[in-house]
Image (cartoon, helix red, strand yellow):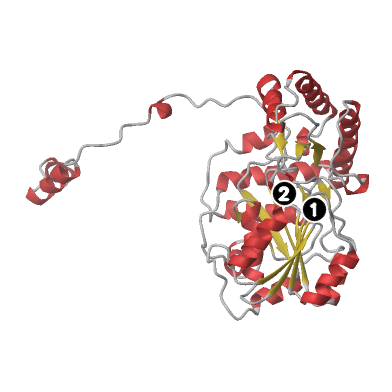
Amino acid sequence: MFQALAKSSAAPGPQAAGWVQTMASHKLLVPPPKALLKPLSIPKRLLLGPGPSNLPPRIMSAGGMQIIGPMDKEMYQIMDEIKEGIQYVFQTRNPLTLVITGSGHCALEAALVNVLEPGDSFLVGVNGIWGQRAMDIGERMGARVHPMTKDPGGHYTLQEVEEGLAQHKPVLLFLTHGESSTGVLQPLDGFGELCHRYKCLLLVDSVVSLGGTPLYMDQQGIDILYSGSQKVLNAPPGTSFISFSDKAKKKMYSRKTKPFSFYLDIKWLANFWGCDGQPRMYHHTIPVISLYSLRESLALIAEQGLENSWRQHRETTAYLHGRLQALGLQLFVKDPALRLPMVTTVVVPAGYDWRDIVSYVLDHFDIEIMGGLGPSAGKVLRIGLLGCNATRENVDRVTEALGAALQHCPKNKL
């Protein structure tokens, strides 16, 4: 039989021969890219911007492990361990806690697309770029968006938010815990209770703040909390995570219309992540390797302990502030209590172009810092101390680089 199979495959019939000829009937118009025929080359760089951060060796090793099937029982075990890690860093017991395949933007969109319906009132704290993005997404979904706009560096008081709640009667309030574009740390105590008094849910962005400063989802009455992998957790970009209170779940599961996005439909995702007690069904192909890395990043912070991580960021950033002020640089956020421990914003010194400073530090010291973003663009430099990068040694390195930049970059160029 094998000889017959070999003979038949060696001599294709007329139809098969024609098919083979058709397959080769066109010449390739696009040759192999020359760049892809060379080895991949990545510069060695210290990432001290607002994120992403450098990867510790353990997380890099996890990214080199062999892939397994996304619906294998071993993968489900890894997913369950990730959920427990998220519950720990969020300080929540919410069963509806899961990973989103996408960056922090994707988690924000998942929250809004599942909670808001067309015509819903949505109150947004806009004191930086992330409030701007939340407002944009809400408008795209047909919500009635009411921005509470602050100048860069501003934050919100309970009284200001209560006035907005009373006036607009929103179903959802958005606040950014750590506004990485301006360096502001938004206080959260009392806001959950205030929102619930007005029958409003509280949605909080903790992408840059998670793991670096105290945050207590359940005790602070936060209904929806999301974060990202690439900041304090030191995992590769591309995954985010989110948790929903019972109040938020009730709002989502009683909506009158389907969410606009199938990919971000929380009912489907909740099932796939084992949050609903039902047999898991396929929804999408998860990024298995990225989840290995995320699992290890959560393991590292669990081993260190949240309180130790908070202390590390607080103390290292205080040391950074002292070194910056010794250089004659001015911190953008005036109130020390409102300064974000993970991302420090520095006023661009008079007479300098911020682009010259950023470029000099990168070109001469292989250190990446960033300029402003959104409403802070052109006004600040941003220096990030995230996770394993939050060390006094790195502070010494970046302040030495900044000192050299101030000596060598041209002044009064603009």
Q: Which mark is residue 238?
A: none
Q: Residue at x 63, y 78 (%)?
A: 255
Position of residue 214 relative to residue 303, above or below, is below
Label 2, secondary structure: give it.
helix
Q: Are marks 1 and 2 in contact (CB under 8 Å)?
A: yes
Q: Which mark is residue 151?
A: 1
The correct choice, above or below, for 232 with respect to 389 in the image is below
Position of residue 29 in the picture relative to residue 158 (left or right): left
**Residue appearing at x 84%, y 50% in the figure:** 185
Res 375 label: 2
From this view, report whether residue 46 is shown above or below residue 207. Answer: above
Residue at image position (75%, 42%) is 232
Mark 1 belongs to which amino acid?
Asp
Identify the residue at image location x=83%, y=76%: 166
Query: Gap between marks 1 and 2, in whole Å?
Result: 8 Å
Q: Residue 273: horizontal and vertical position, in percent?
A: 62, 61
Residue 169, x across and y down, in percent? 77, 77
Q: How far across and down, in percent of the image, does residue 5 sit?
A: 16, 45
Looking at the rendered image, the quarter that the C terminus falls into is top right
